[in-house]
Amino acid sequence: MMSKKDFIEFFGYKIHNLTMQETVTKIDNYIIKKKCAQHVVINVAKIVNSNNDRLLKNSIKTADIVNIDGAGIIYGMKLLGLHPKERVTGIDLMMELIKLSEIKRYSVYFLGSTTHTLEKLLINIKIKFPSLIIAGNRNGYWDTIEEEKLIVKEIAKTKPNILFVGISSPKKEYFISKNKNYLNSNLIMGVGGSFDIYANITKRAPLFFQNYGMEWIYRIYQEPARMWKRYLITNTKYFFMLIIEFFSLKDHNIIK
């Protein structure tokens, strides 16, 4: 049973205020009880984009577990007088859940990215976790609703305890929210570009950037043409959202 202290209200979202270990324990309990849960991480892009995307907003609001991923969310919460425990990044949580799955003999399914990336990912995963039960894998590309339904049926047949969805936002949120009751999995988790990193296709930011919440700078360095505009627009919008919210709370004496 979770209390109000386990949640933080932030821009209309009810976000779990959990550590990494608390999150893993919560997910483990879902699997033990054979429940179906949708996991979502929240970052600046999702906060900003969900303002104009009803489906994305709904997928976050209806998720069973919502973790704080982006450093910008941590800083924003602190600015508004809130007390987040820590970041629980999707890429790190994915690895913790793979460790848990090998120990407890849970099965996992990998959906997303390209067939080439999946092949490299599975090789690396099997080297590091030789006893991990891999229920199946499938690339993240399809063209029709009928094809999507077939993919859902294929996954459901394997009954994975954990389904990792390595598709970009907001497509993965749409897919999970729409199909979570038909995928026959205890936990469905969107992991974005994590497959590419664990397949050694792309590199994660060095620890210095991770520890100081500056991974976005490293991503711009890696893909300047694609990333600079995205971060400029979303970060600027988020900054003004925070300023407006800060003075609104101050006017109501919620922030002293």
Image: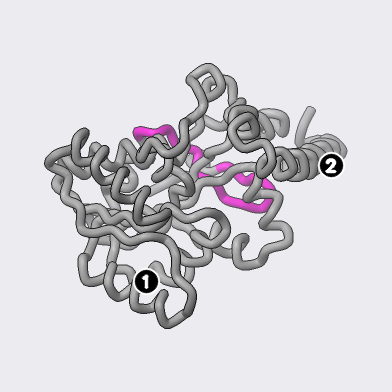
The outermost residue toward the bottom is 146
| Helix, strand or loop under label 2 | helix
Residue 71 bears which disc, if any? none
Residue 89 % position (x, y): 47, 37
Taking depth in this image into account, of 101 and 112 the one nearest to the observer is: 112
Residue 250 % position (x, y): 83, 35
**Kind of residue at disc 2:** Ile
Find the magenta span and give its range.
8-21
Side (left or right) of 223 relative to 107:
right
| Residue beneath disc 1 | 181
The residue lying at 47 percent from left, 66 percent from top is 175
Residue 244 bears which disc, if any? 2
Residue 178 % position (x, y): 47, 71
Residue 243 % position (x, y): 82, 37
Q: Nearer the viewer, mark 2 or mark 1?
A: 1
Residue 162 versus residue 75 in the image, above or below = below
Taking depth in this image into account, of 179 and 18 the one nearest to the observer is: 179
The outermost residue toward the front is 116
Question: How crowded is the residue under tag 1: few (<14 C-alpha within 10 Å), some, or many (20+)?
Answer: some
| Helix, strand or loop under label 1 | loop
Residue 104 versus residue 82 in the image, above or below = below
**Kind of residue at disc 1:** Asn
The residue lying at 76 percent from left, 36 percent from top is 254
Q: Earlier in the sequence, mark 2 or mark 1?
A: 1
The residue lying at 68 percent from left, 63 percent from top is 53
Residue 172 versus residue 148 in the image, above or below = above
Residue 20 versus residue 45 in the image, above or below = above
Side (left or right) of 37 relative to 48:
left
